[in-house]
Image (cartoon, rainbow, N blue to C red):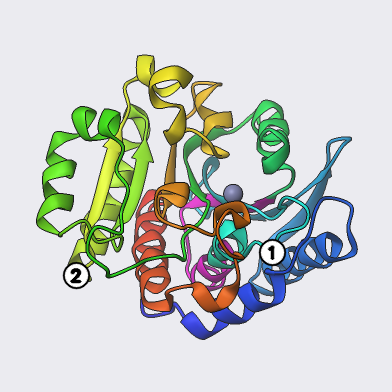
Amino acid sequence: MDCIDPARWAEDVAFMAASRPPGSIHWQKVQDRCAAELEGAGFVVERQDYGSGVNVIGTREGTAAPSEVVLLAAHYDHISGCPGADDNASGVAGALEVARALGQATLPRTLIVACWDEEELGLRGSRAFAQAFTGAKLAVAFNFDMIGYASAAEQSQIFPVPLAERFPGLADELAANKGRADFIAVVADPSAEPFALELEAQAESLGRLTGVMTLTDAEKLDEDAFGVLSLSDHRSFWELGLPALHVFDTGVFRNPAYHCTVGLDTADKLDHAFATDVLKATTAAVAAAAGL
Ligand SMILES: [Zn+2]
């Protein structure tokens, strides 16, 4: 956890945040930055061109069980006509910072850190990767999508009634926290829950309130009831029965600038202390998942 450097994360966010719809000049620069940073962190980098888009895949082979894989990823594309600092420069920069931190460690299992394309166009990049992933066993996939926004203002967090009814313990914790939008949210399927609980324990050891929402296998693909919890790339893995968890700031339920709805999603609005806690807790959880 001590290897996490918030300044490097902030530098990457500042570089990436501008508008970057797929195929644009800045989209290409962000894709190149993903590749360069992963290479610099000691990963073998491949660009997966799946037809309509390009994923960047960095692999560090495990020393003891190389066929067992832990994945950490974030989407680097964004909608057109809107900067995307929280969504999802924060997550891509976060995945790269965790890669730099763990690039210094000897990991028994293989670690893949990836930057997905075309999440905003229907999870295309992550789905292409998940469908092509054969020959190895996926221990768990960690997904970052919006990890940089927080507010200490009371009642700044929206927690919709159906979620509050499904997760009453978490609803009570959030009420006791006076509705402040400053906790880390984690969504998991049952097979990823142990990794989510490890992340929660690590974050709470830093004094950061964290809420884990585990959906049953029946619930996780139920778009009518729980679609708001599967709006990002972790869904691509759930669809194939693979373990995945989603780490985020609750996105649209917290950040008014989500997709530039109210104001622009720019880097100056991000909370560096919040993101730092996400990165530290995730680094520890990924390291544990990778057998460290
Ligand atoms: Zn996103």
The residue identified by callout 1 is: 83
- Is there any visible trace of residue 197 in the rendered image? no
Q: Secondary structure at mark 2?
A: loop
Residue 235 sits above or below residue 180 on the image: above
Q: Is residue 210 left or right of residue 250?
A: left
What residue is rendered at 55% in x and 65% in y? 90
Residue 108 sits above or below residue 234 on the image: below
The residue at the far top in this view is: 218
Residue 61 position within the rendered picture, expressed as x and y whole percent measured from the top left: 60, 53
What residue is rendered at 52% in x and 85% in y? 7
Image quadrant containing the N terminus: bottom left
Query: Bounds of the magenta span?
Result: 95-115
In the rendered structure, which amino acid carries the disc numbered 1? Pro
In the rendered structure, which amino acid carries the disc numbered 2? Gly
The residue identified by callout 2 is: 207
Q: Quadrant of residue 176?
A: bottom left
Closer to us: 263 or 192: 263
What residue is rendered at 88% in x and 58% in y? 24
Residue 29 sits above or below residue 144 on the image: below
- Is there any visible trace of residue 26 in the rendered image? yes
Residue 162 position within the rendered picture, expressed as x and y whole percent measured from the top left: 28, 28
Q: Secondary structure at mark 1?
A: loop
Q: Please tell me whether residue 154 belongs to the stretch shown in magenta.
A: no
Q: Please tell me whether residue 111 belongs to the stretch shown in magenta.
A: yes
Q: Quadrant of residue 182?
A: bottom left
Residue 27 position within the rendered picture, expressed as x and y whole percent measured from the top left: 81, 60
Closer to us: 283 or 173: 173
Distance from the alpha carbon under mark 2 to that under mark 1: 31 Å
How many residues crowd around disc 2 within 10 Å: few (fewer than 14), some, or many (20 or more)?
few
